[in-house]
Amino acid sequence: MKEILNIQKQLLPDLIDTMKKRYTILQHIMVSGVVGRRTLAGSLNMTERVLRGEVDFLKAQGLLEIESSGMRISDSGRHLLESMEPLAKELFGLNELEERIRLHFGLKQVVVVPGDSDVSSHTKKELGRAGAAVLRKYVAHNEVIAVTGGSTMAEVAYHLTSSTSLKGSWFVPARGGLGESVELQANTIASTMAKKTGASYRLLHVPDHLGEEAYQSLMQDATISEIIDFIRRARIVIHGIGEAMVMARRRKVDEATTASLRADGAYAEAFGYYFDRKGEILHKMPTVGLRIEDIQQMDRVIGVAGGKSKGEAIASILQFGHEDILVTDEAAATEIVNMLSS
Amino acid sequence: MKEILNIQKQLLPDLIDTMKKRYTILQHIMVSGVVGRRTLAGSLNMTERVLRGEVDFLKAQGLLEIESSGMRISDSGRHLLESMEPLAKELFGLNELEERIRLHFGLKQVVVVPGDSDVSSHTKKELGRAGAAVLRKYVAHNEVIAVTGGSTMAEVAYHLTSSTSLKGSWFVPARGGLGESVELQANTIASTMAKKTGASYRLLHVPDHLGEEAYQSLMQDATISEIIDFIRRARIVIHGIGEAMVMARRRKVDEATTASLRADGAYAEAFGYYFDRKGEILHKMPTVGLRIEDIQQMDRVIGVAGGKSKGEAIASILQFGHEDILVTDEAAATEIVNMLSS
DNA sequence: ATCGCCGGGACGAAAAAGGTCCATATTCGC
DNA sequence: GCGAATATGGACCTTTTTCGTCCCGGCGAT
């Protein structure tokens, strides 16, 4: 069954939505007994008109009966609801995950794709696709879009396609070099995204492993500070989320810092900051670009990450409290929800 | 799987169509390798614009890739097609039945609902619903609609609903009393249909079991002949189909006639006429109303019947050659198709 | 008798879908 | 190397559908 649903979700995503909508309506009518159009519209958060359309349809299908006193479910309708129960559970499963996470952390939107990115590369691709779709949805015209590095963001970049809504945009790295390998660096991702969408990009070339004073002088440089100002004009950022220790290792963070991170209980990493399980910042990578206060003042912070192993890290970033949209997968979402209830 | 599809069909009837359409497109692209929009539109019998909409959608879903040299299926697309194979078989099964019957008998439309009316009352209801939908589709405004009796037609009547397209219509019995029980008589059905839809009706009260001369004098009667003229104004008729012997028994046809019917190899009955397997008329019930030449000149003759046992009877009526639309069920359709190939 | 809620009709605004044509890029055959 | 053929993507207009909004008459409870 899940199989069929996944197929259909790919082949007709919006029909699944209307299926859910109609199921919800029918169920509401069943539990309400006899109910009027306006009342029902109110309790379902729909306008009267669209509900009316749906009701007309359900009536034509013989799933409900309409009398002058209101509408009532028919026998076929009741029968349909019964036989649909397992299907509905499946249908709303992910939705429920999304809603629980969204409400708990007060997010604008949560998108959960089925599967586990740790296990299946297909899920990771799905995650990228969903991330790309979300970005396309929330971006305004001719905006500056800050992006971070990482394999997930690379996947997002891969799934972006040329579209008018992104044509005039500027992709920029959220922060400078963070010790990633070239193909996963924010610079690379930003330029890939720009090329994929037909947008423009500007890069921030900051060498890794510089001393403190070298950084200070870099910051003084006119072209560097100009691009940093440009980056800070971004009102939207899309970023990956990593497990703190994994990231520290991958980025070859020095022994002492790694030990301190471990001691302090670092859970997560995002845009070069390390967070503990409560979402408090423990450490900041030595580079330039968006500061934490810039992130906090963003309109739309989009986090994209999945895989069961990243569940805790994602939860930690959500605790930080400045995310607006989360794109994740079923495994991570389940993990997060489990943490909430325990 | 079939279960799920049937559920979904109730909640979104065009889901199947859309799914089939997109599947077909994707499959065509796969077998074509790289193909252009116009070429594809041609071979799929779609307008370019509609195909373009679908292709844009499939691209957004990441199921195909578009290059300036044409479109090609993506890995996800290929994977989707593979995993859809059993589903597609299911999807197109009924359609194939419909098409084969439609083409063989040169009909306007064939509708096959899943199941077997002999076995499942739910299928019979489905048949009624489908019949009602077909009637609503083909009826013009303010028309005279001739109907026959029978349990299937009763089911159709039950599933008709009030709709503007039927408001001004007149329902009339195709022929007078045919010896059915009251609730299955054409008169009853016609009035039920009218009441259900908010249309009008006129009835033809002809007593059963009258002698020949009594009929002749009835025909002379002004009110009777007036209503018969009214009935003959019908350009659309919807009727059931019965097995000859079953109908003869139910209508208590006299011994001699029954024997003669059996001797002549009567297979089917419809609107009071009995047909042999080649669709030749063997016998005519003694009543008034539509004559066979009226039927032959109809614009839209809609036959509704299902159940494995009726397969042969339906085929016989189709041989008669004056049906335009057939509504049946899977069991009967399979039976008919088997007869064709043997 | 009145009030509140019911379904349903009507109508215009807005959005989506569809038909048609054209500009530009790429490929293939010569 | 070059032109013909075919590709996509953009643009524009018409048609159709959807949606918001308001109103009417009916019915039942108060």
Image (spheres, coloured by chain):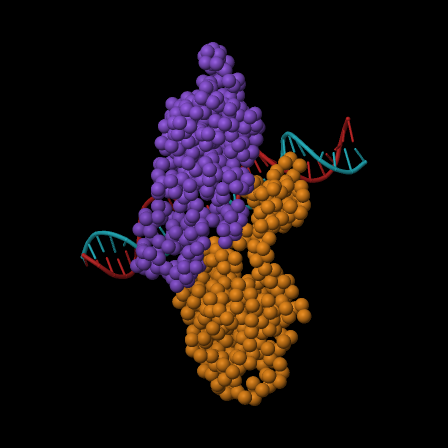
Chain colours: A purple, B orange, C cyan, D red
Q: Is residue B302 visible?
A: no
Q: As rendered, which of A83 and A331 lies closer to the eye?
A: A331
Q: As rendered, which of A250 and B198 lies closer to the eye?
A: A250
The C terminus of chain B, quarter of image? bottom right
Residue B305 vertical placement versus A34 (above, below): below
Residue A40's x, y, as percent? 33, 51
Residue B323's x, y, as percent? 58, 68
Q: As rendered, which of C4 and A331 lies closer to the eye?
A: A331
Residue B104 vertical placement versus A91 (above, below): below
Total marks placed: 0
| Picture quadrant of residue A196 | top right
Outermost residue to the bottom: B256
| Residue drawn at 61 percent across, 45 percent down | B78
Residue A217's x, y, as percent? 47, 10
Q: Can residue A150 be seen in this view?
A: yes
Residue B310's x, y, as percent? 56, 73
**In the rendered view, does D21 fall on the left or right side of A7?**
left
Residue A95 vertical placement versus A187 (above, below): below
Q: As rendered, which of B205 and A287 lies closer to the eye?
A: A287
| Residue drawn at 48 percent across, 86 percent down | B210
| Residue drawn at 48 percent across, 64 percent down | B126
| Residue drawn at 52 percent across, 79 percent down | B247
